[in-house]
Amino acid sequence: MARVFQRGALAAVALMLAGAAQAAAIKPAVVYAMGGKHDKSFSEALWAGAEKFKAETHIPYVDFEISNETQFEQAYRHFAQHGFDPILGVGFSQADAVKKVSHDYPKLHFTLIDSDLKLPNVQSVQFREEEGSFLVGVLAAMASKTHKLGFVGGMDVPLIRRFSCGYAQGVKYADPKASVIANMIGTTPDAWTNPGRGAELAKGQFDRGADVVFAAGGQSGLGVLQAAADAHKLGIGVDSNQDYLHPGSMLTSMVKRVDVVAYNALKSAAAGNWKPGASVLGLKEGGVDYAYDQYNKALITPAMKAKADQAKADIISGKIKVHDYESTNSCNV
């Protein structure tokens, strides 16, 4: 019965815009990560990029929000069977599904953000999260009064360790005497959708003296940021610019330009110049950065901004080399 319902739900999504999509040169489809398109983080950035493309070109797209990871392959296969092209997804958890379906549909185009797939009809894009995390670590260390910083990650995987390691390096760069308390929410995909647990871990770090916490846990991170606001501590958002969530307690956000990647993938497909291949975007390419806007500029002093901007310039020039956790599966800070 559950499988029948899932197939029916996917069919309804596809048929909803089928008539309009048929009139377009391309028929885009989007598959979100766990947490859904309005997670105020990773998936929402994908949605924003697709929405910008639709607004500019008037080409509609269909999308699908999964309830569990077993639906990834089903969603991709369904869209492929119905001729949707290109098909965009976000998150390393979708890699197996894309690998299988792209093999079965070699004439279709697949863009997977945050994964590394070298296949003839797949465009995969990754980010140097450690570089953006280094910058927010610099700001966190300079904002801290206790010299103790917090980090709460989602699922304990090498990708999230990359955030944690970059953050710790930035903290030490700005304040060699500072320390970082790091916790992961869990080891299963549910770790991305547990804001209550995120809040508990953040509170525990505050009890141990941390006064700034960096949340890199998808929807679970929202609990971390809420806990920081409630405790009158400082929070750091991730992926999308989350500064607006709690003005006055959001120090900054480590942004990944998933929206730009999604928009560019759709634009290139519409223009007929979409190309497969793997790429990695860091500070130099504008793929990651720290957020500075009307919501947090009162919290970032000129000295803090100057320090972060200098670190950014030095990373881009190669003067500062930020260690990537995944290169050695270790973080020596």
Image (spheres, grey):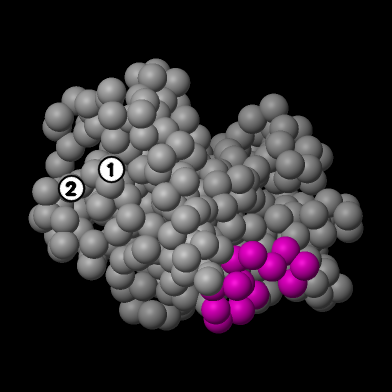
User: On the image, which quarter does residue 246 sit in?
Assistant: top right
Start and end of the magenta stretch?
185-197
Q: Which of marks 1 and 2 is nearer the N terminus?
A: 1
The x and y percentages for residue 55 are 44, 21
Q: Are marks 1 and 2 in contact (CB under 8 Å)?
A: yes
Image point (37%, 52%), residue name: 89
Check the image and report above or below for 281 versus 220: above
Q: Can residue 258 be seen in this view?
A: no
Check residue 84 in the rendering and tell me which mark sits there, or answer none: 1
- Residue 64 makes an appearance in the image: yes
The spot of residue 126 in percent (x, y) is 33, 55
Judging depth in this view, the residue of 201 and 223 nearest the camera is 223
Amino acid type at image mark 2: Leu
Q: Residue 298 carries which label?
A: none
Task: Tell me the amino acid under the disc marked 1.
Answer: Phe
Residue shown at the point (20%, 53%) measured from the top left: 122
Q: Is mark 1 on a helix, strand or loop?
A: loop
Classified by dominant secondary structure, the portion drawn in magenta counts as: helix
Residue 84 horizontal/vertical position (percent): 28, 43
* Magenta-span inclusion, residue 191: yes
Is 117 situated left or right of 308 in this image?
left
> What residue is at 69 percent from the left and 27 percent from the top?
294
Dot 2 corresponds to which residue? 108
Question: Looking at the image, which residue is at 55% across and 63% down?
Answer: 67
Q: Is label 1 or label 2 in front? A: 1
The stretch drawn in magenta includes residue 41: no
Residue 174's quadrant in the figure? bottom right
Q: Residues within 10 Å of mark 2 (few under 14, many from 20)?
A: some
